[in-house]
Amino acid sequence: MKMHQGVPGSWDSHEFFPFLNYRGQVRLVHGSGATGLQLVQSYSDSDEDSDGAWDGRLGHRYDPPADAQPDTQEIDHSEIRTQILLATASSGQKGRHSFTHMLAEREKGRCCGSSFSHGECSRIRSHFLPNHVVYKDTYQQKVFCGVYSDEGNMFLSACQDQNIRLYDTSRGRFTLKKTVKARDVGWSILDVCFTPDASCVLYSSWSDYIHVCSVDGDSETHTALDLNPDERRFCVFSLAASTDGKEILGGANDGCLYVFDREQNKRTLKIDAHEDDVNAVAFADSSSQLLFSGSDDALCKVWDRRTLREDRPQPVGHLAGHRDGITFIHSKGDARYLISNSKDQTIKLWDVRKFSPKEGLAASRLAVTQQNWDYRWQQVPQRALKRHKLTGDTSVMTYRGHGVLHTLIRCRFSPEFSTGQKFIYTGCSTGKIVIYDVLTGSIVSKLSNHDACVRDVSWHPYHNNMVSSSVSKTTVFILLMKTMMKSIC
């Protein structure tokens, strides 16, 4: 067993095993024997590198419980509520007006000018969510990632067959443009992203390198960015590119954040950020100065790029309230609000102006040490579905009703242009896509067209369709959801 250098030699077993469990060195799960426990060695709780343990179908035996009456006390008095109501032209509405009522008001000249305002258009679009399935492509291996470019003209799919497929999605198309063979792939590609100008694709795997591949033209140029880690077995689970494309941010299994400068062609920062795997990283807004990170230690941390130092890695603040590891983070893009998906089967909405106190950090850390099940191959125990808030939980809202099993499932805000970011959408271990109303916490749509876990979903930034990436035992489907005339209202 690999020993962590931070383990005191004087600890006895009742202190030692909880420590290793917390650090991700081992997992204590229910098993046979006199103690009723089984010790499972795991250098990384988010390994995702065992096909036998990762079938993607366990979620069929699990019906994620949703909140019948979500607690909206915090969000009802929040600024994000005002933002969304303004973005969807709903701030002055008393009750919900139908589509036909809005058309009648426009005909009477009561709209902004002679047409709908952008907010009114967003409100209309948000009434008609994707609900029609079109199967666009079939692979023979598991798909782990699928994302649109910022402008929505390209879609990128990353598969366990080590191929990156680029689709032309301009002008309503969805046609395969290019297939790129990834390099230095350990087990599978685990994260991908476009550079902001969509000229290059970044991808990571179980490797010391982040790879950059050009996608313009017929030629391919691969560049390996050496992160020079200390760990022998190393993986970047999450990637993000700065707005100018010069810096690459990565979160890794050694608990560190890595910043690579493409102009200097070297790693410029390695930050000892968390006490366990860093599963999620994101830039807060277009300035790329604030960074978010999420880890298996159940904490989100906020960092200021301008004050980051390797010798004194101090976050701006902590966001505590999850009971188990964080699988994904998505920023609203305003340097204030973000959401986090977690193995505790919840999504939480955070306001970076409301950091958690020390009591909150202690409560989350304690909750993590009490998790004695493994989300990769075990069902969710009832005791893990606690609904009361932890002490010091400063989240604005909590969303329940989707399953987070098997893999690092992603969640995101819906696009600003078409919906005013009124929704949160997420993959689900039951093979569904779940869409929540940000302000009410209720589930407004469940799309059930996969027979295994949905790991990634991407909503087109301007058109009302989304693409989901899922796995099955032998075949993978990517689904393009197109809106039919069926209102959710």
Image: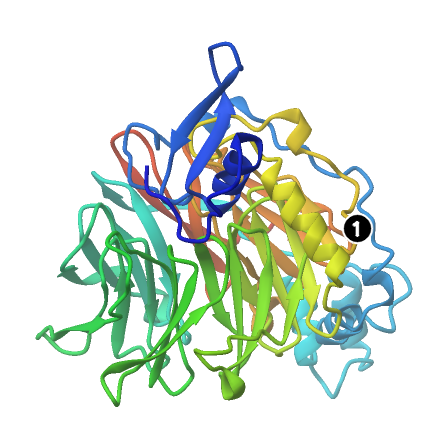
For image coordinates 31% across by 77% down, the residue present is 198
Q: Nearer the viewer, residue 369 or 245?
A: 369
Q: Nearer the viewer, residue 76 or 109?
A: 76
Residue found farthest to the left = 219
Percent coordinates x, y for residue 191 in the rendering: 34, 58
Side of 79 where 54 appears, left or right: left
Percent coordinates x, y for residue 102 in the rendering: 77, 68
Three-letter code for the amino acid on which mark 1 is drawn = Thr
- Residue 428 appears in the picture as rendered: no
- Element type where label 1 sits in the image: loop
Mark 1 Cα shell of 10 Å, populated few (<14), some (14-19), many (≥20): some
Up-down: is 241 above or below 393?
below
Residue found farthest to the front = 10
Residue that numbered label 1 is attached to: 391
Q: Nearer the viewer, residue 261 or 6?
A: 6
Side of 201 where 47 appears, left or right: right
Side of 228 where 97 appears, left or right: right
Percent coordinates x, y for residue 187 in the rendering: 22, 45
